[in-house]
């Protein structure tokens, strides 16, 4: 395809389907623009591109990576492909109206019966194509998808035949890069949609409700019988819609499903993680059409209602065995409002802030009044990724999280939140919630020391950081205390018993350890060693710029566990420095506040736009 002929294809949504289509369309010579709302994920894709592995092995980098559909306004797209979940689609369609030109064709690359109607509402039948996707994948990393299967061909058609030539064009482009796609008429397209939806409906809800992988469900005779009956109900309803399948269709479906891997279907994962599901377009549509023709679809109805009942409820309490116990313990430990319950929290708009520090990851959940509902922390350097997943699952299952923000040392590599912000801004937001106006903020973290200066409007005016390595930080303090054989939990109280004024001469951890050993060999008292370590850190902080004449507050995990530092810093700066309550959670609290502010701002913009349109 020459440059003059290059088709412009925009893709909204970068789950596995969106990623696979983006890479393949670019490989075929199209000019591809991709839209991903998650800031961290978008940045990683922009910097490193998209990588596909396993059944399809390929990679591609993209010049146009957007976080908002509005960024494509002047791009003049030929095609706009929606690869989103159903609950995300109406908002995306509304935003995409600014891209609607005479030549634009929109494509639904989504699962479910009548899902394309969401696009028809915004763009009309004449401009809408529908794809039936017969490939899938699992995310390995934010920009990496493991393609688990491709059962060719895919199918694509025009809803009312108006743009059958456009469907043929897309089919030809994808087939040219070994993603075989067949163009079909509108009636054949409906049949293929029902065929795929019946397959999806047979396992997805069952696996979600029963916490079963596809392989587990297909290896249990009892569930196999259920699955076959769910398929049979779908076939019976389809027949009433004049959609006819071969006599051996159910047998073919069961053979196909037996190849399912030891992983959860997408809808099951959404249910387990307390995210909105697409049940209305899967089993729910089979039930809806069954009612139309007075055909009973009892199993599909049962699973539809069970999924709906479990959505946005306290799923954690239903998880059996050890996993459920772990999650209940997390909730018991982290809950701040002991009088609250999952049912209460699910009826509130809640916001999550995660501070991914170098030593610890801190989680804070607030409601729409900024009341703190939940706090939790984990060692960041812990190799047990399951512990992190357990906390996230607990949060998502017990609270109705509307928006989330990540900050801290590891924020750039974390994609499970809506936005990422620097810890400087989050610290300022957290402290300013309690103390308005001009201020200094001292944050001694695991790997750095920060002094943040806020103006009278609570905005960050300036900030300063320690100039080299981890000198004077939490990690330095821990290593030196360990060498001196001082229990870190007793160190602050020990230091308060001493009047010794000797400090460490070196801030290099290696040399400082040697110096500490010399103190030990000289017979120096433990309390004097403890005070000497603190004096060294206080002197390090005192060399940094602290604006006089305005209040100063301390935050961070170090001051939470080493309050004696405040005594020394009060002397060094000749002022009363205040320690914020629960100082180690101030940054994650600030991140939650920013998530709340961002959500409210976006909601207000949407409402204003709707008022203007009306």
Image (cartoon, grey):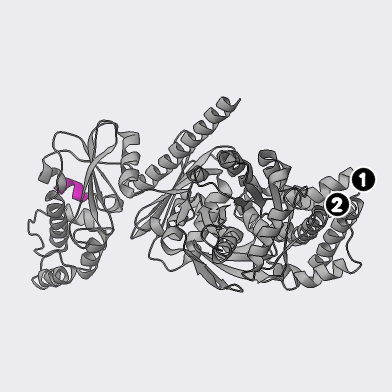
Q: Which mark is residue 298?
A: 2
Is residue 247 among the parts visible in the rendering? yes
Residue at x 38%, y 65% (from the top left corner): 381
**Closer-to-camera residue (174/506):** 174
**Closer-to-camera residue (515/257):** 257
Q: What's drawn in magenta, residue-wise? A: 564-568
Q: Residues within 10 Å of mark 2 (few under 14, many from 20)?
A: some
Quick check: 231 left or right of 123? Answer: right
Q: Quadrant of the C terminus?
A: top right
Q: Secondary structure at mark 1?
A: loop
**Closer-to-camera residue (156/607):** 156
Asked if marks 1 and 2 touch (Cβ < 8 Å), the reply is: no
Mark 1 sits on what residue?
294
Q: Quadrant of residue 243?
A: bottom right
Indicate whether residue 566 is drawn in magenta.
Answer: yes
Q: Quadrant of the N terminus?
A: bottom right
Is residue 13 among the parts visible in the rendering? no
């Amino acid at each position: 395809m020459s440059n003059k002929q290059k088709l412009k294809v925009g893709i909204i949504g970068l789950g596995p389907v969106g990623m696979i289509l983006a890479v393949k369309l670019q490989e075929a010579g199209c000019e591809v623009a991709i839209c991903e709302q998650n800031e961290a994920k978008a940045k990683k894709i922009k910097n490193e591109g998209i990588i596909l592995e396993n059944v399809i092995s390929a990679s591609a980098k993209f010049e146009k990576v957007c976080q908002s559909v509005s960024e494509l306004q002047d791009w003049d797209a030929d095609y706009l492909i929606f690869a989103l979940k159903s609950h995300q689609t109406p908002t995306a369609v509304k935003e995409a109206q600014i891209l609607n030109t005479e030549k634009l064709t929109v494509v639904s690359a989504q699962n479910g019966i009548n899902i394309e109607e969401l696009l028809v509402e915004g763009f009309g039948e004449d401009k809408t194509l529908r794809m039936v996707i017969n490939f899938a994948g699992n995310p390995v990393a934010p920009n990496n998808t493991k393609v688990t299967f491709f059962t060719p061909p895919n199918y694509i058609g025009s809803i009312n035949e108006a743009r059958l030539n456009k469907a043929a064009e897309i089919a030809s482009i994808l087939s040219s890069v070994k993603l075989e796609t067949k163009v079909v008429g509108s009636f054949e397209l409906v049949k293929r949609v029902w065929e795929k939806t019946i397959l999806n409906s047979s396992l997805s809800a069952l696996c979600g409700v029963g916490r079963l992988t596809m392989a587990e469900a297909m290896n249990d005779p009892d569930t196999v019988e259920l699955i076959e009956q769910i398929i049979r109900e779908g076939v019976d309803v389809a027949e009433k819609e004049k959609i006819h399948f071969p006599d051996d269709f159910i047998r073919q479906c069961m053979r196909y499903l037996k190849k399912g891997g030891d992983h959860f279907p997408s809808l099951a994962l959404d249910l387990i993680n307390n995210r909105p599901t697409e049940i209305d377009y899967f089993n729910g549509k089979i039930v809806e059409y069954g009612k139309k023709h007075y055909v009973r679809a009892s199993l599909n109805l049962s699973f539809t209602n069970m999924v709906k009942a479990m959505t946005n409820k306290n799923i954690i309490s239903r998880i059996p065995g050890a996993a459920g116990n772990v999650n209940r313990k997390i909730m018991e430990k982290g809950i701040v409002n002991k009088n609250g319950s999952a049912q209460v929290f699910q009826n509130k708009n809640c916001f999550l802030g995660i501070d991914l520090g170098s030593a610890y990851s801190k989680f804070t959940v607030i409601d729409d009044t900024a009341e703190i509902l939940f706090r939790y922390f984990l060692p960041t350097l812990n190799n047990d990724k399951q512990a992190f997943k357990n906390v996230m699952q607990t949060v998502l299952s017990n609270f109705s999280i509307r928006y989330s923000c990540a900050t801290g040392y590891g924020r750039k590599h974390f994609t499970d939140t809506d936005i990422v912000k620097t810890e400087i801004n989050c610290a300022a937001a957290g402290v300013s919630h309690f103390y308005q106006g001009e201020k200094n903020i001292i944050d001694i973290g695991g790997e750095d020391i920060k002094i943040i200066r806020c103006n009278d409007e609570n905005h960050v005016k300036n900030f300063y950081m320690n100039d080299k390595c981890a000198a004077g930080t939490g990690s330095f303090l821990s290593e030196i205390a360990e060498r001196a054989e001082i229990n870190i939990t007793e160190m602050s109280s020990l230091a308060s018993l001493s009047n010794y004024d000797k400090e460490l001469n070196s801030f290099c951890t290696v040399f400082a350890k040697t110096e500490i050993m010399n103190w030990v060999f000289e017979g120096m008292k433990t309390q004097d060693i403890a005070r000497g370590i603190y004096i060294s850190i206080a002197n390090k902080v005192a060399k940094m710029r602290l604006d006089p004449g305005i209040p100063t507050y301390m935050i961070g995990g170090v001051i939470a566990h080493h309050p004696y530092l405040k005594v020394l810093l009060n002397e060094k700066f000749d002022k009363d420095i205040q320690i914020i309550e629960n100082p180690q959670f101030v940054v994650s609290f600030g991140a939650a506040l920013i998530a709340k502010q961002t959500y409210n701002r976006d909601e207000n913009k949407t409402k204003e736009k709707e008022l203007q349109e009306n």
